[in-house]
Amino acid sequence: MERKLRPRKTQEEKSAGILDLLKYLLFSYIVTGIVLLLMAFVLYRFGLTEKIVSIAMILLYTAASFLAGNLAGKKMGSRRFLWGFLMGTAYFLVLVILSLVVNHSIGDITSSFFTTLLLCAGGGMLGGMLSH
């Protein structure tokens, strides 16, 4: 069986790929910001319960990770599930860092830390797997 050799990527191509991944992560956070603003309006207007808001946040994190993973999977072509997983994990890490900066403590993160990590990483992985 003959093995095909792929041409090696140049340093320029690698950095362009990483830049694209950062763009996809930023795009997923822009979508998150827009949806959060919409949720704040709906919360203010209709007085939603905390349970409904929590469910909406979980869906938002998962969907944004899915989006980032899907875009990364399309861009990278091979090992799409891995790139999606990495994008979901990166999305989660940015969430953790932002929470630490805003709250100045890790208290709010620890209550649902692993659940949110699994949702973000799983959503990103699923997005990568379903990309074409």
Image (cartoon, rainbow, N blue to C red):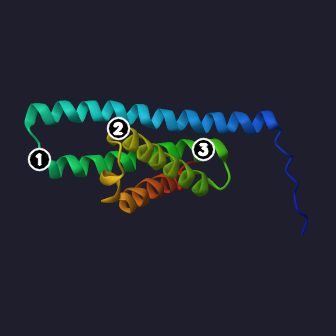
Q: Residue furthest front?
A: 104
Identify the mark at residue 58; answer none if there is no mark: none
Amino acid under label 2? Answer: Val
Q: Earlier in the sequence, mark 2 or mark 3?
A: 3
The crowding category of the residue bearing disc 3, from other C-alpha atoms within 10 Å (few below 14, some 14 to 19, many at least 20), is some
80 and 20: which one is in front? 20
The crowding category of the residue bearing disc 2, from other C-alpha atoms within 10 Å (few below 14, some 14 to 19, many at least 20), is few
Amino acid under label 1? Answer: Thr
Image quadrant where one finds the N terminus:
bottom right
Residue linked to disc 1: 49
Q: How many marks?
A: 3
Residue 38 appears left or right of 77: left
Task: Name the residue at 8% across, 36% down.
Answer: 46
Residue linked to disc 2: 102
Q: Residues at badges 1 and 3 in contact (C-beta under 8 Å)?
A: no
Residue 15 image point, x, y percent: 72, 35
Vertical position of residue 57 compared to residue 115: above or below: above
Instruction: Assign a secondary structure to mark 1.
Output: loop
Residue linked to disc 3: 74
68 and 91: which one is in front? 91
Q: Residues at badges 1 and 2 in contact (C-beta under 8 Å)?
A: no
